[in-house]
Image (cartoon, grey):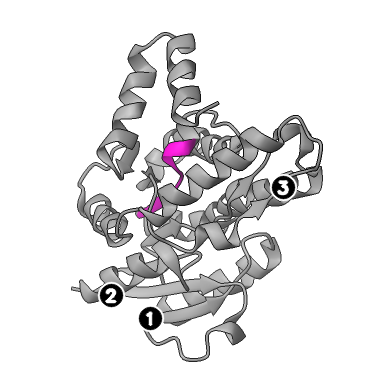
């Protein structure tokens, strides 16, 4: 049987790298993407393509190159993303636009590039990596939450629009995992004299503790394989700490103000 071809954006590190390594070990033909190949001269875990999800033309070129080489793309994992923190009032708007360009527009550009090929194949699977944070507006992470939440809603629509073509869509929402996302995250500066300075500083410390104590990203890779192997993939999947997943259940059943109070207590606000 011909091996399935998997394309993973943001595949050079963190969750994307773990997904690529695991899927390759299971017999898939894996291609990851990175913005700058020159930064990974010794990378030999799987093939890397140079691709910036913010560049639609570059995406088209990379996808065409892969199709020319392999003849197909069976699975797209939209994993590339960036973190952003800060009080919304004090976060520079160009940084907000950058976050949405990577976390929301980027996956949509990728979907648009691969869908014609999947439609011609009459089969395909696209997994959009969102976040448990995308199910709620988190204080000082509101832009990140919004960008991931928007991707989740767009995925629901895409799933219905493409079902008749044999294409499946799912979201996979991780909680906190031990990756380098904190180091690459944009932090709005803590401004001297700002009314947000103290609570923002405290919340940042809690966020970083959660990432440092995060689970092994290989758990996300295992869930990706589970989705690939599913005959009828579900709309949404979650993976992470029990309490993080349980918080989504609480959001469904608790009054909004009660849930808001729980979040504020968690972040000591």
Any magenta on residue 131? yes
Q: Evaluate whether residue 145 shows in this view.
A: yes
Question: Could you tell me how far apart the alpha carbons at marks 1 and 2 are, in whole angstroms?
Answer: 7 Å
Q: Position of residue 245 (x, y in %)?
A: 31, 34
Helix, strand or loop at label 1? It is: loop
Residue 64 location, quadrant: bottom right
Q: Which mark is residue 188?
A: 3
Judge by depth and name the residue closer to the eye, 167 or 7. 7
* 247 vs 210: above or below: above
Q: Earlier in the sequence, mark 1 or mark 2?
A: 2
Q: Which residue is mark 2?
A: 24
Q: Residue at x 41, y 47 (%)?
A: 210
Q: Which residue is mark 1?
A: 46
Q: Position of residue 139 (x, y in %)?
A: 58, 31
* 176 vs 269: above or below: below
Mark 1, Cα crowd under 10 Å, few <14 / some 14-19 / many 20+, is some
Query: Which residues lie in the magenta part?
Result: 124-133
Helix, strand or loop at label 2? It is: helix
View extreme (bottom): residue: 42
Q: Earlier in the sequence, mark 2 or mark 3?
A: 2
User: In this rendering, would 135 be left or right of 113?
Assistant: left
Question: Could you tell me how far apart the alpha carbons at marks 3 and 1 are, in whole angstroms?
Answer: 35 Å
- Please identify the quadrant where the N terminus is shown: bottom left
- Please identify the quadrant where the C terminus is shown: top right
Judge by depth and name the residue closer to the eye, 76 or 222. 222
Q: Position of residue 91 (x, y in %)?
A: 75, 41
Q: Evaluate whether residue 2 shows in this view.
A: no
Q: Residue at x 45, y 72 (%)?
A: 32
Q: Earlier in the sequence, mark 3 or mark 1?
A: 1
Q: Residue at x 52, y 90 (%)?
A: 41
Marks 1 and 2 close (CB-CB < 8 Å): yes
């Amino acid at each position: 049987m011909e091996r399935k071809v998997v394309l993973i954006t943001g595949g050079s590190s963190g969750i994307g790298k773990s997904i690529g390594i695991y899927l390759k070990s299971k017999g898939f033909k894996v291609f990851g993407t990175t913005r700058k190949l020159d930064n990974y001269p010794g990378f030999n875990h799987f093939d890397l393509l140079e691709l910036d999800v913010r560049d639609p033309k570059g995406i088209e070129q990379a996808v065409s190159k892969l199709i020319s080489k392999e003849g197909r793309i069976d699975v797209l994992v939209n994993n590339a993303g960036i973190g952003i923190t800060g009080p919304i009032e004090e976060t520079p708007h160009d940084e907000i636009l950058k976050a949405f360009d990577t976390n929301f527009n980027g996956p949509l550009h990728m979907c648009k590039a691969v869908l014609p090929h999947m439609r011609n194949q009459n089969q395909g699977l696209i997994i959009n990596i969102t976040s448990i944070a995308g199910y709620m507006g988190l204080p000082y992470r509101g832009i990140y939450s919004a960008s991931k939440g928007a991707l989740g809603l767009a995925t629901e629509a895409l799933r219905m629009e493409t079902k008749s073509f044999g294409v499946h869509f799912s979201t996979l929402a991780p909680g906190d995992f031990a990756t380098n996302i904190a180091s690459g995250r944009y932090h709005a500066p803590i401004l001297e004299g700002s009314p947000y300075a103290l609570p923002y500083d405290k919340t940042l410390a809690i966020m970083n503790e959660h990432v440092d104590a995060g689970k092994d990203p290989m758990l996300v890779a295992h869930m990706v394989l589970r989705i690939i192997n599913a005959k009828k993939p579900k709309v949404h999947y979650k993976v992470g700490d029990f309490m993080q997943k349980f918080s989504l259940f609480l959001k469904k059943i608790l009054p909004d103000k009660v849930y808001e109070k729980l979040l504020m207590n968690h972040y000591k606000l």
